[in-house]
Image: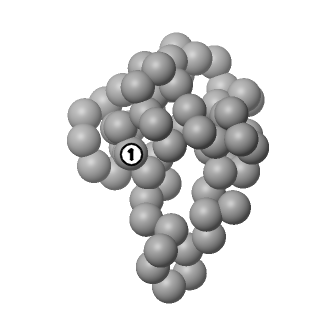
Amino acid sequence: VLFAGSVGRTDLTGGNETQMRHSLRTISHALDPETFMIPGHGPVTTLAHEIETNPYLARARRIG
């Protein structure tokens, strides 16, 4: 789950950090940067804004 400036927790039962990074990386490369993101928590944002400001998305793109 992508939130504005964050992501869903992977430390809870059923969470998986590797799968989360894979999903974030896939989404960030497949979608147009100007795609509106309507997160479960927080304001509406764009993928471009999240790429610039969301440390979890930046890490997923960098590390894979």
> Which residue is more in the foreground, 34 or 54?
54
Q: Quadrant of residue 5?
A: top left
Residue 61 pos. (x, y %): 67, 34
What residue lies at 50% left-to-right and 43% top-to-bottom? 56
Q: Which quarter of the image is occupied by the C terminus?
A: top right
Residue 18 pos. (x, y %): 69, 61
Q: Is residue 1 above or below residue 17?
A: above
What residue lies at 72% left-to-right and 28% top-to-bottom? 29
What residue lies at 65% left-to-right and 51% top-to-bottom? 21
> Which residue is more in the foreground, 50 or 40?
50
Q: How many marks?
A: 1
Q: Quadrant of residue 39?
A: top left
Q: Quadrant of residue 4?
A: top left
> Which residue is more in the foreground, 47 or 18?
18
Q: Secondary structure at mark 1?
A: strand
Is residue 57 visible in the rendered image? The answer is yes
Identify the residue position indicated by label 1 in the image: 6
What residue lies at 43% left-to-right and 65% top-to-bottom? 9
Q: Is residue 43 above or below residue 49?
A: below
Q: Is residue 46 above or below residue 6?
A: above
Residue lying at the far bottom in this picture: please name it.
13
Residue lying at the far top in this picture: please name it.
34
Q: Residues within 10 Å of mark 1 (few under 14, many from 20)?
A: some
